[in-house]
Image: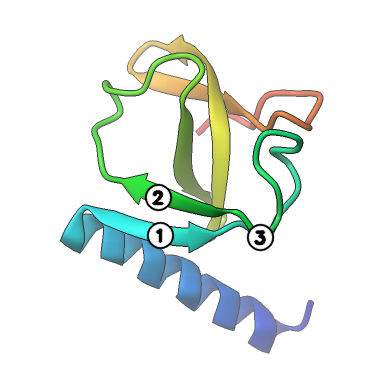
Amino acid sequence: MDSTLEGCAASKNELAAETVRAFGALRLRVTGSSMLPAIRPGDVLLIRQCGADVPVVGDVVLFTRERRLFAHRVVARSGAGLVTQGDGVPHPDPGR
């Protein structure tokens, strides 16, 4: 992907994250396939702001990594953090 497209995508992701922080909720259309079969590309997710202590194993959470947004399932807790993984991905996400 060229740097202009990467910058545009990063700006949209930052705007989405800021919207959740400012208003507490956001509707977001899924573009990736890492959560198949539970969440499909084109599905619309309702994102609600919460603290890291609220989600439990099995919940789907939205987070940013490398200026990208991910909606993945909580598969474990690690101290005060969460371990996440896409349903269609063989391994947990890298630690944050």
- Quick check: 32 above or below 49? below
Residue at the (27%, 21%) spot, across then down: 53
Residue lying at the far bottom of the rendered structure: 4
Query: Mark 2 — residue?
Result: 46
Residue density around tag 2, few if under 14, some if 14–19, many if 20 or more, within 10 Å: few
Residue density around tag 3, few if under 14, some if 14–19, many if 20 or more, within 10 Å: few
Residue type highlighted by circle 2: Leu
Mark 1 or mark 3, which is nearer the start of the sequence? 1
Q: CA distance from mark 3 to mark 1?
A: 12 Å
Q: Give coordinates of residue 14: x percent, y percent.
A: 41, 68
Element type at marker 1? strand
- Quick check: 57 above or below 14? above
Residue density around tag 1, few if under 14, some if 14–19, many if 20 or more, within 10 Å: few
Mark 1 or mark 2, which is nearer the start of the sequence? 1
Q: CA distance from mark 2 to mark 1?
A: 5 Å
Query: Mark 1 — residue?
Result: 27
Q: Which mark is residue 42?
A: 3
Element type at marker 3? loop
Residue type highlighted by circle 1: Arg
Q: Give coordinates of residue 8: x percent, y percent.
A: 57, 82
Element type at marker 2? strand
